[in-house]
């Protein structure tokens, strides 16, 4: 399918390499290289397949992990769950993975963790592969240059049965991240700022390449934080084409190719870079030098403000839909328009999720927490993104920093990002490193403020939303 | 797969932007082995007060909107998680179509595999339809015709587009997996070539037993 004519973007090259046949009207039947299943949506897909009497087409390309429903409690049992009925789904996923010969990471496996943390960490997500999962944050692994996106359970069934998927080809957008990050400002602040600029619907119908000097000098883990939230502005696909940073990250990972196969793969991956004159349907440029730490104030990630800023007044919001939503959001979040975001008292601080629970995130938070204490009356929890991350953090003593500061130190799970511990955060105001501040997302009545791990740590110490720059640098 | 050709029905306006799938079906409603019974989960956080007591102010609890089969919403409807329970719950409650200026991409695809038609119209047009139905207190019905690609209400009509493969699938109630399986020879030829270029994509290391 690959045409030789003209310069191409990374996305065009990868898409065309996977297009088996055009189905008309911009729809292609795509080869799918990796399918990842998790306990919340995975067993439904397999049961659909079973009900139709079909078998997996290529179980060697299918992986499964327990992450959404398993408890993060230290010393947890294999089926222990924070969600009523969760144990049954965990056991279901375990049994079905075994029955169908799917590579499975159980809840007590040393390699277990949140699916999007595990898949690049193990080298299952690779540059230029198509990787799908019944989870919208699958775009996270675009951070290693995979073309990865979230799908529904029926689409999962389609992939299981055929290892292909028909998809409408999206338009292309490039987000150029220029300038230089200031002290106390991280990948999370960039992506929140971007969503504030282009809106929670700004990426509908686009595949987004993140580019520019800030991306090129950013480690893979930060790139994954940025790609993770591509779907929060409704780009199903977000990615950073592979470069030396990517290759250094992936070399030697358990499921990555080795030896001669690695060298061959590297040569192929290098050919995927966006050609110098390739055109995008839309380009957005962000000057990262102007970004301060970001915190959301509402119930959509687009409702975000710099830590030195204040919640906008309704009359300052030009768009009628956004103005209407801001009133609804303020009623839910129980804050007044016009007040500064800094100083809002919090009940709970959470560090975790596929957005911000990799080793570099825990280090950034620990740098703020070292020698300090969480404010009285504040509950603070850290849930590493994978058991490998937890082991690495413990090897360098980070758990001691968290524990001495007054944080709880948990085992890897999706936990309090997706109402997995709703009883603990219900009705509370939480500052959180997660990706969604939707109404009720973390629990009934929970008011979520999204921020970076460093900002969450600084706020935990202050007992209120705080400017981390006053503690670091 | 359930098909959709055309319907004429009550259309309920829920004119908000960014109605996310956590609102359509809250996360706690998802933890279940069976896929039946999602009708009760639809908009659970907005529809109920306390333990499943109907919120008298929520539009879908108010006649005649409680019999609506078409939902009207503002942009970015169905943003958020990939949960297929979102279109399943809308369908189970009785909706056959959602009309909005734009949809979350994963949700949009999921609709077609659950007998639900997402219709994209400009916000001015959705607002015009919402005004018509509100002015008539719901007695003015709305028609959605997928075959013709047309929405009509009173004496007005609006055209909409749907990607051809998805349109065909929904019109005929086709099983996309069967369609793909009928192409397996062509797929095998593609893989034979692709495997030469990208062997690592196919030969996954067997790290675990």
Image (tube, coloured by chain):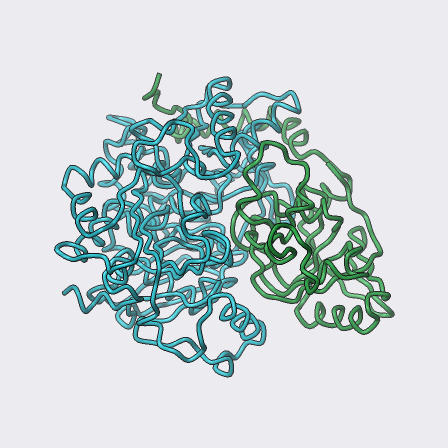
Chain that the image shows in green: B
Q: Is residue A199 above or below residue B194?
A: below
Compared with residue A277, is residue B125 higher up or lower down, i.e. above or below? Answer: below
Residue at the location (65% across, 56% down)? B47
Q: Nearer the viewer, residue A188 or A80?
A: A80
| Outermost residue to the bottom | A315
Task: Name which residue lies at 53% across and 58% down.
Answer: A204
| A156 lies left or right of A183 | right
Residue A266 on image: x %, y %: 29, 36
Residue depicted at x 55% and y 35% = A156
In this rendering, is residue B188 above or below A454? above
Query: How many numbered discs, if any?
Result: 0
Instruction: Please tell me which residue is depicted at 53% across the width and 73% down the height of the picture.
Output: A327
Q: Position of residue A89 (x, y in %)?
A: 51, 30
Rendering coords of residue A329 (x, y %): 51, 68
- Specify the quadrant of the image occupied by residue B83: top right
**Whole-percent x, y for residue B96 in the image:** 75, 50
Q: Is residue A234 left or right of residue A184?
A: right
Chain A drawn colour = cyan
**Quadrant holding the C terminus of chain A:** bottom left
Please state which of residues B159 and A111 is positioned toward the viewer in this rendering: A111
Pick the front one: A7 or A178: A178
């Amino acid at each position: 399918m690959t045409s030789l004519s003209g310069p191409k973007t990374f996305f065009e090259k990868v898409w065309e390499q996977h297009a088996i046949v055009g189905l008309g009207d911009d729809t292609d039947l795509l080869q799918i290289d990796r399918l990842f299943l998790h306990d919340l949506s995975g067993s439904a897909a397999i049961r659909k397949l079973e009900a139709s009497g079909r078998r997996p087409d290529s179980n060697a390309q299918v992986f499964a992990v327990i992450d959404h429903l398993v408890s993060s409690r230290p010393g947890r049992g294999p089926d222990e769950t924070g969600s009523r009925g969760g144990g049954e789904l965990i056991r279901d996923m375990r049994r079905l993975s075994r029955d169908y010969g799917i590579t499975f990471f159980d809840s007590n496996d040393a390699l277990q963790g949140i699916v999007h943390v595990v898949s690049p960490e193990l080298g299952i997500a690779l540059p230029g592969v198509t990787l799908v999962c019944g989870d919208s944050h699958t775009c996270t692994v675009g951070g290693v240059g995979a073309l990865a996106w979230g799908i529904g359970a029926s689409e999962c069934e389609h992939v299981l049965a055929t290892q292909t998927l028909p998809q409408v080809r999206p338009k292309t957008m490039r987000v150029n991240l220029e300038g230089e990050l200031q002290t106390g400002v991280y990948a999370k602040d960039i992506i929140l700022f971007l969503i504030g600029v282009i809106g929670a619907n700004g990426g509908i119908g686009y595949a987004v390449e993140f580019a520019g000097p800030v991306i090129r000098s950013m480690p893979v883990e930060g790139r994954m934080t940025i790609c993770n939230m591509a779907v929060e502005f409704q780009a199903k696909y977000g990615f950073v084409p592979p470069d030396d940073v990517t290759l250094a990250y992936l070399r030697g990972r358990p499921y990555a190719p080795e030896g001669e196969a690695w060298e061959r793969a590297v040569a192929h991956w290098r050919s995927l870079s966006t050609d110098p004159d390739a055109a995008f349907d839309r380009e957005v440029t962000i000057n990262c030098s102007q970004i301060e730490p970001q915190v959301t104030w509402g119930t959509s990630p687009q409702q975000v403000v710099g830590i030195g800023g204040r919640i906008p007044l309704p009359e300052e919001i030009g768009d009628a839909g956004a103005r209407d939503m801001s009133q609804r959001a303020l009623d839910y979040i129980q804050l007044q328009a016009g007040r500064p975001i800094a100083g809002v008292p919090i009940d709970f601080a959470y560090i975790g999720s596929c957005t911000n629970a990799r080793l570099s995130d825990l280090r950034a938070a620990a740098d703020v927490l070292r020698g300090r204490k969480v404010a009285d009356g504040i509950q603070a929890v850290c849930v590493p993104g994978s058991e490998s991350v937890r082991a690495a953090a413990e090897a360098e003593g980070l758990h001691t920093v968290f524990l001495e500061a007054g944080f709880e130190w948990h085992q890897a799970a999706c936990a309090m990002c997706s109402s997995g511990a709703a009883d603990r955060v219900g009705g509370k105001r939480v500052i959180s490193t997660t990706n969604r501040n939707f109404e009720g997302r973390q629990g009934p009545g929970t008011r979520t403020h999204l921020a970076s791990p460093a900002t969450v740590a600084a706020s935990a110490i202050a007992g209120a939303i705080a400017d981390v720059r006053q503690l670091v640098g | 797969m359930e098909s959709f050709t055309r319907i004429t029905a009550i259309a309920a306006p829920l004119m908000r932007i960014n109605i996310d799938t956590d609102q359509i079906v809250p996360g706690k409603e998802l933890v279940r082995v069976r896929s039946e019974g999602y009708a009760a989960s639809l908009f659970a956080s907005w529809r109920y007060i306390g333990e499943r007591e109907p919120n008298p102010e929520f539009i879908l609890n108010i006649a005649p909107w409680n019999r609506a089969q078409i939902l009207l919403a503002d942009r970015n409807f169905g943003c958020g998680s990939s949960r297929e329970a979102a279109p399943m719950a809308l369908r189970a409650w009785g909706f056959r179509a959602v009309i909005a200026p734009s949809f979350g991409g994963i949700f949009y695809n999921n609709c077609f595999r659950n007998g639900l038609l997402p219709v994209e119209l400009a916000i001015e047009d959705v607002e015009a339809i919402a005004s018509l139905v509100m002015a008539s207190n719901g007695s003015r019905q709305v028609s959605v015709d997928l075959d013709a690609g047309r929405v009509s209400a009173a004496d007005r009509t609006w055209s909409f587009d749907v990607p051809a493969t998805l349109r065909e699938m929904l019109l005929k109630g086709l099983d996309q997996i069967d369609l793909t399986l009928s192409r397996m020879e062509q797929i095998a030829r593609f893989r034979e070539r692709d495997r030469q270029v990208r062997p690592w994509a196919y030969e996954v290391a067997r790290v675990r037993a």
